[in-house]
Amino acid sequence: MDIYNMKAHEIKDKLQKKEISAAQVVKAYIDRIEKVDGKVGAYLEKDFDNAVDKAAVIDKKISLGEDLQGLAGIPCAIKDNISTKNVKTTCASLMLENYVPPYDATVVERLNNSGAIMLGKANMDEFAMGSSNENSAFKKVRNPWDLDRVPGGSSGGSAASVAAGEAAFSLGSDTGGSIRQPASYCNLVGIKPTYGRVSRYGLIAFASSLDQIGAFTKDVEDMALVLNSIAGRDYKDSTSYNIKTPDYTKSLSEDIRGMKIGIPVQYFGEGIDDDVKKSVLDSIELLKSMGAEAIEVDMPYTEYALAVYYILSSAEASSNLARYDGIRYGYRSKNYDDSIDLYIKSRSEGFGDEVKRRIMLGTYTLSSGYYDAYYNKALKVRSLVKKDFENAFKKCDCLVSPVSPTTPFKIGEKIDDPMSMYMLDVCTVPINIAGVCAMSIPCGFSNGLPIGLQLIGNYFEEEKLLKVGYAYQKNTNWHNLNPKVGE
Amino acid sequence: MGISADDVKYVAQLSRLEFKEDEIEKFTKDLSSIVGYVNKLNELDTEDVEALVNPIYIENDFREDDIKDSLDRENVLLNAPEKEEGYFKVPTVIEG
């Protein structure tokens, strides 16, 4: 098998057994990127020289007979809103086109410590706003399963890089589905950990009460390895939660007998494609045949989650993005009259349309006279959405639902109608609003396009998601299928 | 509650953004459709419901006030669009 199609744990195994070298692994991925990324567009910035140097260090350790740590020698891509010291971090925005962070995000530091090798920075929707990756200021990402279709967003480059064999795993961020939806569209495993499970220090903020860093992998076993290296409390992020980080590889068990799987009826309503619904229901039948017990649960506030999400995420974005004023870093307009005009021109020239739309919506909902009607109202309904989850988890270990109502759509199909694009997030945003964890895993195809299954877990119960996901993958083959791109 | 072109112009000013006339038209249409949708929340009576700002309650967790290295000035200024003698350079704010 080609190295670039291997799972991270397979590469790890072969490195340890000295069947392959880290230099070979890195070269295989660099060659693959050179071959296919012109078509896919997953990378914004490549960092090959450093990658080759790091591989040499790992090979030295192997030759000295040292045990390899967590992700030693495994090549990865990092979403371009996660700060990387001395490597450009643009958020796919003209605003940060030349921004070079003077420090590493905590997750990057942790990946470095576990020996992972970064190949470059992954393309995305500008400032992580979008569901199709068409909002990158620099170039579109294309779905490796069908180059005329979107890879999903906003972590589209992170997803496409792994799906196309241009990285063994990647990091992304998920504010309303930005990891799970592209994972679903690209036939990958994608996790949004519980709010507070993974440090966000160095993640360029979009909506601070919703943002969470997570990862894309080819299978659940790889996800356990990646989580082991990035999860845990960080004194630099006061919202990272003070709770023990388990060894996630220990939760990989095939035995799910007696586990209670909740089916939230509201996630299967109108608007969900028949093929998507069928694949998810078939998956539930499979989990039942493996000994899990399925029970229907009622989550009546689900239908309000999307409205809550677009109010809160936009309000928080309008506040977070106020920092881009052309003074300390980022784009500064060349033509301005005075300091106020400098802010206005720099922001109007530096931000793309979707970012402006969110800033405008957020500013509107926070403005005098509307604050109570929109922002405060949304915070109240947020309580109700959270209560739905609390009630559901009294009765079951995890919930199962679709990730996206559809399979990947054509590039350009929805870009002129923001509302139709927003509707795609209907099954993923409730999870961010409540702050619980969820993972997308491959569960089928429709007309050659991947479908994802969403497993939703209670606060800090990622282990249950991994357990169910691992058992599911032991009994299915979807996650072993690779796209034909480049052949 | 619809959104007018004047609303859009006012919010643009608050947001420190400016738009051409045709953009105003487009944003008025887009924002009206989004706000129309989120008005759905008014179906719910939330009189006695508490607002939830953060999904998980985290007690203030103070660290020791130790002196640690911070980024040096040169590094911080590396990304400045304009700088002079170790400072960010900005347009004149107070007329002399």
Image (tube, rainbow, N blue to C red):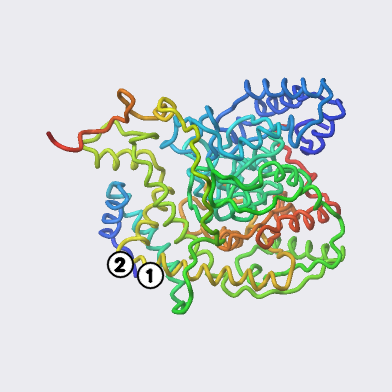
Q: Is residue B80 left or right of residue A7?
A: left
Residue at left offset 76%, top offset 25%: A22
Placement of A261 over or under A78, stated as above or below: below
Q: How many marks?
A: 2
| Residue A373: mark in rendering | 1
**Amino acid marked by disc 2:** Gly
User: Residue A61 sits in which quadrant?
Assistant: top right
Residue at left offset 55%, top offset 62%: B57
Disc 2: which residue: A369
Are callouts 2 and 1 both on one chain? yes
Residue at left offset 79%, top offset 63%: A282
The x, y position of residue A183, in whole percent, is 66, 48
Which of these two is toward me, A374 or A110? A110
Q: Secondary structure at mark 1?
A: helix
Q: Secondary structure at mark 2?
A: loop
The x, y position of residue A346, in whole percent, is 32, 38
Callout 2 crowding tier (Cα within 10 Å): few <14, some 14–19, many ≥20: few
Callout 1 crowding tier (Cα within 10 Å): few <14, some 14–19, many ≥20: some
Q: Is residue A135 visible?
A: no
User: Looking at the rendering, in which quadrant would you find the C terminus of chain A?
Assistant: top right
**Amino acid marked by disc 1:** Ala
State how far apart marks 2 and 1 are (Cα): 8 Å
The x, y position of residue A448, in whole percent, is 72, 49
User: Looking at the rendering, in which quadrant would you find the N terminus of chain A?
Assistant: top right
User: In which chain is the residue bearing label 2?
Assistant: A
Kindly check if marks 2 and 1 are in contact, taking CB atoms under 8 A apart as contact: yes
| Residue A258: mark in rendering | none
Q: Is residue A257 left or right of residue A170?
A: right
The x, y position of residue A136, in whole percent, is 50, 40
